Amino acid sequence: MGVSRGERMESQEQAAFQLILHSGNGRSLAMEALSLAKEKKWNAAEQKLEEANQELIEAHHIQTGLLTNEAKGEKVSISLLFIHAQDHLMNAITVKELCEEVLHLWKHLGEVSSS
């Protein structure tokens, strides 16, 4: 017995909410890392970045699952919610990458100035 259109839509909606959740967590953790780096708490900052990365990996798995289903011929509904979820994911990835770069730059500058 196949999945009904209503069940498929509900599943896609849940996936969109999960994308938003994990993306938001990843972005928040990356920003926490930046705050810790300002205080020169390098180990704690790097741990927060790793936690952010794990959240974004989880979001990426959800996204990959949706893409795989579509590649198998399952109709994926492109709703405003889904676009919003994708926007959250891409924004979170960008924020995490920028926070990593800033953290490494601050750490390097601190090492240079103390030499």
Image: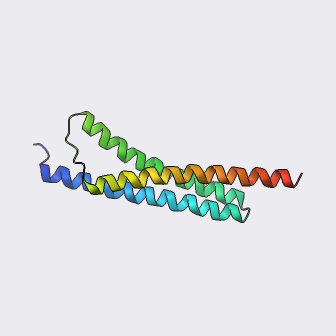
Q: From the viewer's perspective, is residue 79 above or below residue 75?
A: below
Instruction: Decide if residue 63 is in sight here.
Output: yes
**Residue 96, percent across and down?**
55, 52
Judged from this view, the residue extending furthest toward the top is 72
Residue name at image x 48 percent, y 54 percent = 92
Percent x, y for residue 98? Answer: 59, 51
Return the residue nearer the eye: 5 or 101: 101
On the picture, is 86 further left or further right than 92? left
Which x, y percent locates residue 60?
42, 46
Image point 25% across, 38% down: which residue? 70
Which residue appears at 82% of the width and 52% of the height? 111
Which quarter of the image is occupied by the N terminus? top left
Q: Give the color scheme: rainbow, by chain, secondary structure or one colour.
A: rainbow
- In x, y percent, where is residue 17? 33, 58
Q: Residue 36 vs residue 54: left or right?
A: right
Examine the rendering and report whether any part of residue 15 can be seen: no
The number of callouts visible is 0
Residue at (36% x, 41% y) in the render:
64
Q: To which quarter of the image does residue 23 belong?
A: bottom left
Judge left or right: residue 96 versus residue 46. left
Q: Residue furthest left?
A: 1
